[in-house]
């Protein structure tokens, strides 16, 4: 079941979501090149001890993102 759109940075470890869009055009191209494509499932793998960076699973691999980058990814959480 899909919920309302949230920022990827607001999810918790183990949560999964579907990428919807991006809120920051400055990092959009970089995120697209790293495999963060609309429609892809993303799972929060873990956080660094202070919360930044975070590791996510997307497109079959682990990707490290800063909190600011994750905040620009708009997702629909899976429940």
Image: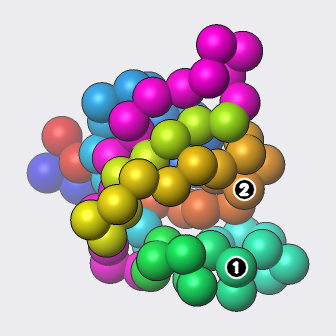
Q: Residue furthest front?
A: 61
Residue stretch in magenta: 38-52
Q: Mark 1 highlights which residue?
A: 30
- Left or right: 18 as drawn, with respect to 68: left
Residue at image location 33% in from the left, 47% down from the top: 43
Residue at image location 32% in from the left, 78% down from the top: 39
Q: Secondary structure at mark 2?
A: helix
Residue count near mark 1 (Cα–Cα under 10 Å), binned few <14, some 14–19, many ≥20: few
Residue 57, percent from left and from top: 36, 52
Q: What is the CA distance from the residue labelled 1 to the residue labelled 2?
A: 10 Å
Residue at image location 23% in from the left, 54% down from the top: 2
Residue closest to the eye, 50 or 12:
50
Label placed on residue 69: 2
Residue count near mark 2 (Cα–Cα under 10 Å), binned few <14, some 14–19, many ≥20: many
Q: Specify whether residue 41 is painted magenta.
A: yes
Quarter in which the C terminus is drawn:
top left
Residue 30, percent from left and from top: 70, 79
């Amino acid at each position: 079941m899909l919920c309302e759109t949230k920022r990827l940075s607001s999810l918790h470890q183990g949560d999964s979501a579907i990428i919807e869009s991006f809120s920051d055009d400055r990092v959009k191209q970089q995120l697209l090149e790293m495999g963060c494509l609309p429609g892809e499932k993303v799972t929060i793998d873990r956080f660094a001890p202070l919360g930044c960076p975070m590791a996510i699973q997307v497109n079959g691999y682990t990707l490290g993102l800063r909190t600011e980058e994750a905040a620009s990814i708009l997702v629909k959480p899976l429940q």
